[in-house]
Amino acid sequence: MGKVVHFEIPADDIDRAKNFYGSIFGWDLQTAQMGGSEYTTVTTTPVDEQTRMPTEPGAINGGLTQRGESTPAPIITIDVEAIDQALSQIVENGGTTVTPRTPIPGMGAFAYFKDSEGNVVGLWESTP
């Protein structure tokens, strides 16, 4: 069963969103270069320093992303064994690929798809 492992909240103004979520919920928000652009990680729960995975069962962390055509609303991300296989099943069942498998060196890969209802959802494949 694929588990929800990440979330992304789109923002028009990343600094304003960082201040909003950090001041209200106490989240740690760090912006860094990732894949040729900036990405803001959102830490809502402690992580294992080696795996970067949450140490609390059921808890997830996420990110802030610039609002765009493929990310107009918050996105949940589901863990899968093989993104390309999952995308094939998605297309066979009426969904579409929004962003194909995109590697993140040393971590894994992600993709976005649109489900049968028009929602954009993420996929995550961990590096073995």
Image (cartoon, grey):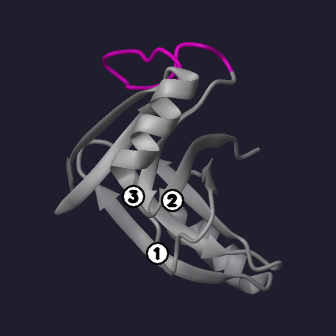
Q: Are marks 1 and 2 in contact (CB under 8 Å)?
A: yes
Asked if the stretch drawn in magenta spans residue 54, the answer is: yes
Secondary structure beneath label 3: loop
Residue 13 tag number = 3
Residue 53 image point, x, y percent: 46, 25
Residue 67 image point, x, y percent: 47, 68
Q: Relative to residue 32, is residue 51 drawn left or right?
A: right
Q: CA distance from mark 3 to mark 1?
A: 12 Å
Residue name at image x 32 percent, y 60 percent: 103
Q: Quadrant of the C terminus?
A: top left
Residue name at image x 57 percent, y 81 percent: 97
**Label 3 Cα crowd, 10 Å radius (few <14 / some 14-19 / many 20+):** few
Q: Amino acid at mark 3?
A: Asp
> Within the image, what quadrant is residue 102 found in?
bottom left
Q: Which residue is mark 1?
A: 68
User: Magenta segment, principal secondary structure?
Assistant: loop
Q: CA distance from mark 2 to mark 3?
A: 9 Å
Q: In the displayed structure, would residue 98 be above or below residue 122?
A: below
Residue 80 image point, x, y percent: 60, 52
Magenta segment range?
A: 43-57
Q: In the displayed structure, would residue 112 be above or below residue 9?
A: below
Q: In the displayed structure, would residue 106 be above or below residue 125?
A: above
Asked if the stretch drawn in magenta spans residue 6, the answer is: no
Q: Which residue is mark 2?
A: 10
2 or 3: mark nearer the eye: 3
Q: Relative to residue 88, is residue 22 drawn left or right?
A: left
